[in-house]
Image (cartoon, rainbow, N blue to C red):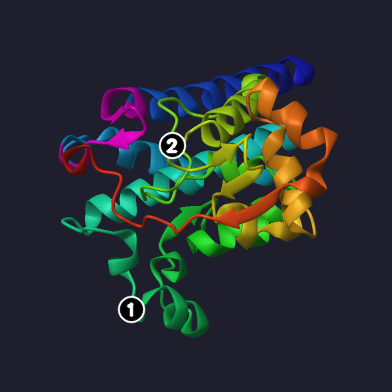
Amino acid sequence: MKFFLILCLAMITGSAATVRHALLSAVLTNHVHDGRVNYTTLKADPRLDEYLAQLSRTDPATLANDQERLAFWLNAYNAYTLKLIVDRAPAKSIVDLGTGGIVLGSLLKTTAWDIRFAKVGGKDYTLNEIEHAIIREKFKDSRAHFALNCASGSCPILRPEAYEAATLEDQLDDQGRQFVQDAEKNQFDLTTKRARLSSIFKWYQGDFGASDQAALLAAARYAPDNIRQAIESDPGAWKVDYLAYDWSLNDTAAK
C-alpha cells in the first residue's frame, strides 16, 4: 500500500510538471509571433500569472534531473521577463525599467535585471541571479544564451513554446541555428572572411571560448554548412567584430 501511494504521488508530480510547461506554451503560442511579443494582449491574459504562481510553489531541486531543471529555469527566466515588461508597460526598452542605464546601472546593481521579484520555490530572485548564479554556473551549457530572451531586438528570439526536458537538446540546437543564421544578429562574409557576431559572443566569451576565434568557432557550429566549413578550415584567417546591441523592445507593435 505504501509503495502504491508513492507511485501515485510520483505520477501526479510528473503530470503537474507537464501541465505547468504546457500552460506557458499556450501563453507563448498565443502572444509570440516571429519572435516578437504582443504585450498588449499578453497583459490581459491571466495564464501568465497562473504559470508564475506554479513556479513560486515549485522547488526545482525536487525535479528528476538536470534536463528538467535547466528547462525549468530557462522557462522561469523568460516568463518573469515577460511579467516584468507587462507590469511596467508602456516601455520602449527593458533598459528603461532600471536606473543608471546599462553601464552605471550594472555597477550599482540597479538595472531591470537586479529587481528582486521572481518567485521560485518560495524564494525571491533577480533575473541576474537566475541567469548567472543558476543557469550559467550550475549547468554550464553555452546554448542557454540562445534560449534566454531579454525582451530586446538583438536577443535570440523568444520561442513560441516552453522548454521541455524531453526535447531540450533539439530546442537548444534549433535556437542556436535560428540565432546564428539571423543576418540581423550575426553576419558572415565569405569573400572578405569577416564575421560580425552578436555582442553576446563577446560578453560571454568565458562560456563560448577565451578568444575571438573561439567565439567564432562556437558560432560557426550553427551557421550554414558552407560558412561553417570555411571557418573551421582556417579560423585564424577570419576577422571578428561585434555588432552593436539593439535594446529596443521586442514588441509586435514596434516591428
Residue that protrudes farthest toward the front in the picture:
191
Inspect the image, locate mark 1, and give the three-letter code of the amino acid beneath it. Answer: Thr
Q: Residue at x 43, y 40 (%)?
A: 184
Please name whichever residue, 219 or 193, is drawn nearer the observer in this view of the structure: 193
Question: Quick one: SS at disc 1?
Answer: loop
Q: Residue at x 48, y 33 (%)?
A: 182
Q: x%, y% of residue 51? A: 39, 37
- Circle 2: is it few (<14), some (14-19), or many (20+) Cα within 10 Å? many
Question: Quick one: SS at disc 2?
Answer: loop
Residue 57: within the magenta?
no
Determine whether, in the image, residue 34 is placed left or right of residue 120. Answer: left
Give the magenta range: 27-40
Inspect the image, locate mark 2, and give the three-letter code of the amino acid beneath it. Answer: Ile
Q: Earlier in the sequence, mark 2 or mark 1?
A: 1
Q: Residue at x 72, y 29 (%)?
A: 228
Say which residue label 1 marks.
99
Q: x%, y% of residue 183? A: 47, 36
- On screen, residue 83 above or below 33: below
Residue 81 visible within the image:
yes
Quadrant in which residue 173 is drawn: top right
Say which residue label 2 marks.
157
Please name whichever residue, 119 or 212, is drawn nearer the observer in this view of the structure: 212
In space, the residues marked 2 and 1 are separated at their CA atoms by 25 Å
Q: x%, y% of residue 221? A: 72, 32
Residue 138 visible within the image:
no
Residue 29: within the magenta?
yes
Q: x%, y% of residue 123? A: 53, 60
